[in-house]
Each structure stands twice: as C-alpha cells, then as structure tokens.
Amino acid sequence: MVGKINGLFGVQGWVKLFSHTQPRKNILSYQPWHIQIDGQWQTLDILKGREQGKTIVAQLRDINNREQAQSMIGIDLYIEKSQLPKLLEGEHYWEDLIGLEVINQQQVVLGKVSNLVDTGANNVLVVSGDKESSSSKDRKEHWVPYIEPFLISVDIGKKQILVDWDEDF
C-alpha cells in the first residue's frame, strides 16, 4: 500500500491523498494505482497530481465531481511490487518484514511482525505474540526499534528477524 484517499479537493472531483512514500509526492510517480472495492481489484489512472500546501492532491480518470470523489474516501492505494525500485543488499521493504518471526538472542520467540511504525526518529517493529500466564493466554506486543543495536539480522529466507530485546520489555 502506497497511500490512501483521505479527502476532497475542489469541486471537480480532485481528491486528497495520504502518502506512505518518501518524499510524499513520490506517490504520484507510481502509475497506475490499484484499488479494491467489494473484493474486486480495479485500476485507477491519475490524470494530474501535485503538492498543494502540505498535502498531495490528484485528479483521477472518470471522477469528475465531488459526489464521485466522496465515494473514494478511505480507499487504500496499491501498486505492483515490480514498480518499486530495487533495494541494496540488506535493505527491505516493510511489506517483506510483516509476518516474519522475531526471536531474541536467548532464542525466545517474541512473536511475528504485525506492522511497522515510523516514529520520526526511527522505524519500529510492532511484534505481536502470545504470552502464557497462569490465568490465560494473553497477547503480548513488543515495539522493537528497527535500528542497531536492537536489530541484529533479518533472514528473509528463514522468515526470521533476530533482535537484542528482552521478552519482558
């Protein structure tokens, strides 16, 4: 997912975009976008787009007024993975990390990566796992900074991330 339609702009069907790309305006360079409506994938073509103040706005093919644009609010925007630039050795897209098992140096499984969060200072792995307690089985969530010295290694082949993180933290 590269972004989301999150608002209206003007009266001619333009929409505001929330972009996950860096810099934010790069979302406009990925075309076409793919959206899912009622379980069906559709292609969305961008006619025009630009930065408008602190937001990104776009005019979409076949969306010509506010009413049509209103129905698009909240829709996630996707692209083909083949549209993304190739990464250097040791670099990973967030999508590739989601679902990987996270273990610490003591070989304790902390859980699986459910999400990543950009805190501004650094990215953080959100790791969800089960923690046994005497009364029940609880969900335990770890927020592990995705930087050294906490991140030791990522092995996509083994679907595993090794971290220096205490299981009780």
Image (cartoon, rainbow, N blue to C red):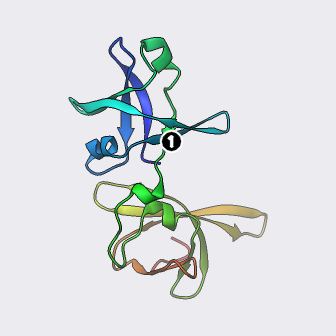
- Left or right of 121, for residue 132: right
Q: Dot 1, crowdedness within 10 Å: few (<14), some or many (≥20)? A: some
In this figure, which residue is indicated by the disc labeled 1?
Answer: 34
- Left or right of 79, for residue 50: left
Q: Is residue 10 above or below residue 125?
A: above
User: Percent position (x, y) of residue 105?
Assistant: 51, 87
**Type of amino acid under label 1:** His
What residue is rendered at 46% in x and 20% in y?
69
What residue is rendered at 36% in x and 72% in y?
91
In the figure, residue 111 lies in which quadrant?
A: bottom right
What residue is rendered at 61% in x and 78% in y?
109
In the figure, residue 51 lies in which quadrant?
A: top left
User: Percent position (x, y) of residue 27?
Assistant: 34, 44
Secondary structure beneath disc 1? strand
Count of marks overlaid on the render: 1
What residue is rendered at 41% in x and 69% in y?
92
| Residue furthest right in the image | 135
Q: Is residue 64 above or below residue 135?
A: above
Q: Is residue 52 above or below residue 10?
A: below
Q: Is residue 117 above or below residue 140?
A: above
User: Percent position (x, y) of residue 22?
Assistant: 29, 51
Viewer-proximal residue, 95 or 114? 95
